[in-house]
Image (tube, rainbow, N blue to C red):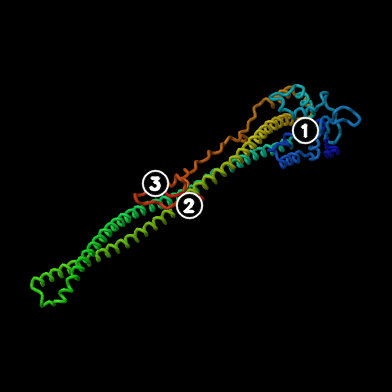
Amino acid sequence: DIQRPNPMVAGGKCSATSQRAMLLLLASPLLLSSVAASEAAASSLISGSGFPRDSVLLMTHMSPNRKVPGGSRPLVADLRGAEVEPNQDGRDPVQQLLATRAYGAALPVSLVDGLVKLRITPQVQETIGKLLEGLGRTFASLEDASRNDTELRDGIHAGFGALATEHNRSKARAMQEGEAADMARKSHVACRGEEWAALARKVEIERKLNISRAARDAQRALAEQRHDALKAHLPEVSERGLSELSSAELAKLASRGQEYHDTMKAYSEAVHAFHTKFEQNRSISEEYARIRTDCNRRQAAFEIAACRFSDSSEDSCAGYTSSYDTRLQDYVAVVRNIAARAADREAEWIHLKRVSCVLAKLGGVEKDGDLAENSTMAREVQACYSQGIVNNDLTISERPAPAREACLAMPTQPCSDAFVQEEYRNLPNGTSATACESTCTATTTPAPTPA
């Protein structure tokens, strides 16, 4: 309860009951406390009424159960801070009117009778006009608040689209990494094919080298045999001299010399052939080693590319999912609050429109005293609470959050057992991958045994 006195209204000549009726209609707790009816709107409405703000707030917060000093009956403060006795039920008719939402579509007859008995003076009519102008601004504020809430809701909803756009960008980047990994995979597989061909050449030259080695060794053994035989015969020839040898002995010596010559020539050719195969084997072996080293390098490049693809895919999905879930949680909370505020505004709109209707009926009386003579006024006031009041501009339609978009299918984790089997199990026969090492996993997985 406010204990300080209420300032007077300058020049107030209307009855305390009439003034109180106007101010209590204006100062509805629903109007002043509504989320949609902002403090600024309430201030403009109060100032537009022509009454001091303190008077209105006093009427708003004055408890109907406040006791008279030294007495026991409840009081209601009027514009001048005076105390006016209430009706027998302890409540002023206008206070009862402020609780109209509890009455549904009809007002108690006693309340209507109390309202139509108010005195309508020119000052009261002027006040009613200002109150209606203030209510008009309040109605505009309610509609503005509804539009602001709609824009707030739509702004947050638009954020889902921004998240989806960024998610699509991150998926595109991940897919580019996937394409790079696929190219690296093909390069590695192609290299293993080259390694297989180099291995086949190496195996073949080693086979020929072994044959050449065997042929060289055989020719060397024969040459040594011919050399020993000739060496054993030469001392006799040297001792006797060529002039002492018969023609048959000379022919035999010549034959042995020719055999020795032919054998040495064959041996020389075998040695040359062996050295040729040996150099070929060295060259082919070096080529095979170079190709295998290159294949191992391509394998490592593929595993790095696969790791980038895996990390990019995981980051894309995790980042989007986390952001989406957070925004969805915020969106649901905001939509729930907006729905509550929208319901308050719609209720306030109906309430103030009914109050406005009553004010318009009362303000339509041309002079004081006509209100009591108007036999239809009670029905017209009652009709203000039976009419349907709908403002579609206050209705905020539902706008569900978009469904969470699908993430990219996660690739097999590089260097896992499944990855090694998928990528390296079907390499060409005779080739094998090295141990799988990846920058995105601490696990080093041995290569599978070639099939």
Q: What distance separates the C-alpha of mark 3 from that of mark 2?
A: 18 Å
Q: Quadrant of residue 329?
A: top right
Question: What residue is shown with label 1?
Answer: 24
The residue tagged with tag 2: helix, strand or loop? loop
The percent position of residue 418, horizontal first and vertical second, equals 45, 44
Q: Please provide percent x and percent y for residue 225.
A: 21, 65
- For disc 3, the marked residue is 425
In the rendered structure, which disc, 1 or 2, sits on the residue that comes first in sequence? 1
Q: Position of residue 269 (x, y in %)?
A: 22, 66
Q: Nearer the viewer, residue 369 or 195?
A: 195
Q: Looking at this rendering, what residue extends furthest in the left direction?
A: 247
Q: Which residue is pictured at 76% across the width and 33% down the height?
A: 125
Q: Which residue is mark 2?
A: 438
Q: Earlier in the sequence, mark 1 or mark 3?
A: 1
Residue 114's place in the image compared with 186, above or below, is above
Q: Helix or strand or loop: what does disc 1 sit on? A: helix
Check disc 3 and give the amino acid type. Arg
- Above or below, 401 against 183 in this view is above
Position of residue 231 in the picture relative to residue 174 (left or right): left
